[in-house]
Image: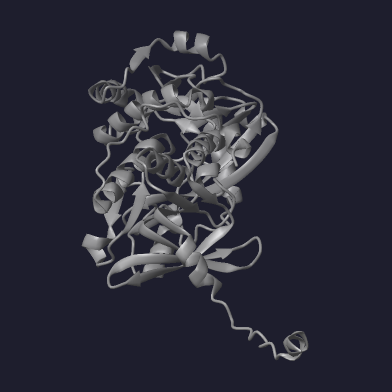
Amino acid sequence: MEGQEGLNRQVPVPICVPVDFGSILSAMDRYDVAIIGGGGTGAAAAYDLTLRGFKVALFERGELTSGTTGRHHGQLHSGARYALGDVNIARECMSETLILRRIAHDCIEYNQGLFLALNEEDCALTDPFVEACISAGIPAREIPVGEALSMEARINPKAERAVLVPDGTIDAYRLAMAFFASAKARGATIRHFSEVIGIDVVSGTVGSLLIHDLLNGREYRVQADAVINAAGPWSNRVAALAGIDVPVTAAAGSMVAVEGRIVNMVISRLRRPGDGDIVVPQRRLSIIGSTQQKTDNPDGLQPEREEVAFLLSAADELVPGFSLQPLRAAWSAARPLAGRTGDDGRAISRDIAIYDHGSLDGVKGLFSIIGGKATTLRIMGEKVADAVAGFLGVPVACSSADHALLPHSAYWRLP
């Protein structure tokens, strides 16, 4: 009977063939731009690119902001600190300060700053300092020391001159997360604990990234038409995955926080930038920063005892009694300075450097961004996005300065 024959018919047994899940994901996960590095620069670049209509993915090997971004003292630089050394950087800081106050006001405390001259050498620098600030568009003005003391009663009463500048403070975590939230709301894919362990280059063009998901141990690939290396002091390590050398100096700096908001303004030493010359109020803490020395490994940095003692002593010069406050924490972070040096890196400009590895190294579609400041994260994102948009042939103008960011808390409410 036909029914019985049907029952007796041999049914082929499926053969289990190994599936290349990497290939499947490669075909599925394709982006216009992939960003490596989940700090402030990566966040700003992701947001900028989504505003221009690009499909973006960002990969961070740790938690978001767990590198340099989450470890600075949080000064919103008016640019005054750099006015004597680099007027362009000073002007850029002032411009970005105004933009951040407009688009991310809930992450900014505009508490202003005082520069104090404590000795004859500092005093001799005061007039050139004010002139340099004015030339850079920074509304600095000298005020009587008595007036400065009325603003901040705990500053050194032996200060000889004082200059008022429009400094402020940044909530470093919230500012970066506001950029992440705004990028995510516009469709960006943000993946933390996702380490890029390979950059595939095909016929001189970047093709895909090999990702190690640290949460579940699997590896997968994503394709991208362009890749931004925004790994900060780890940028050379990332670039090496594509056989490229990036000139970056990882400059380690230590900071110390004590309990109590001793001052409400940013208090700086009126001298050329050096160690231990800025006191920054953060919530109910006061932070003195920082030191600087070159490091070969930006991972696992820890402050030395000598650094902590030095910083507390330097803080006492600006704000007597600082070191008597209960110690809250001491930590270190590495600044990604553009260029190489054999010394501590103080001579390296804080300017922003963007490397187009297509023209420099024969790897088209790969870009590295180095340098800058926390204050300039937005324009860093703008500049690298300009370079990538030009490479992709989509010259859409930047508009990140024109829109208020979402609050940082929106990041966890988005799907």
Q: Residue at x 57, y 21 (%)?
A: 263
Q: Residue at x 55, y 71 (%)?
A: 21
Q: Is residue 181 left or right of residue 96?
A: right
Q: Please name the residue shown 58% across and 25% down the image.
A: 320
In the picture as drawn, the residue positioned furthest to the front comes out as 1
Nearer-the-camera pick, 214 or 222: 222
Where residue 154 appears, x then y in whole percent? 57, 18
- Spot occupied by residue 61 in the image (x, y as percentages of width and height): 55, 57
Return the residue nearer the eye: 96 or 156.
96
Q: Residue at x 45, y 8 (%)?
A: 147
Residue closer to the observer: 146 or 259: 259
Residue 261 found in image quarter: top right
Note whether 278 is above or below 385 in the view shown.
above
**Residue 16 position in % (x across, y down):** 63, 84
x and y, in percent, of residue 300 in the image: 58, 57
Seen in the picture, residue 90 relative to 301 is either above or below; the reply is above
Tell whether 210 sits left or right of 1: left
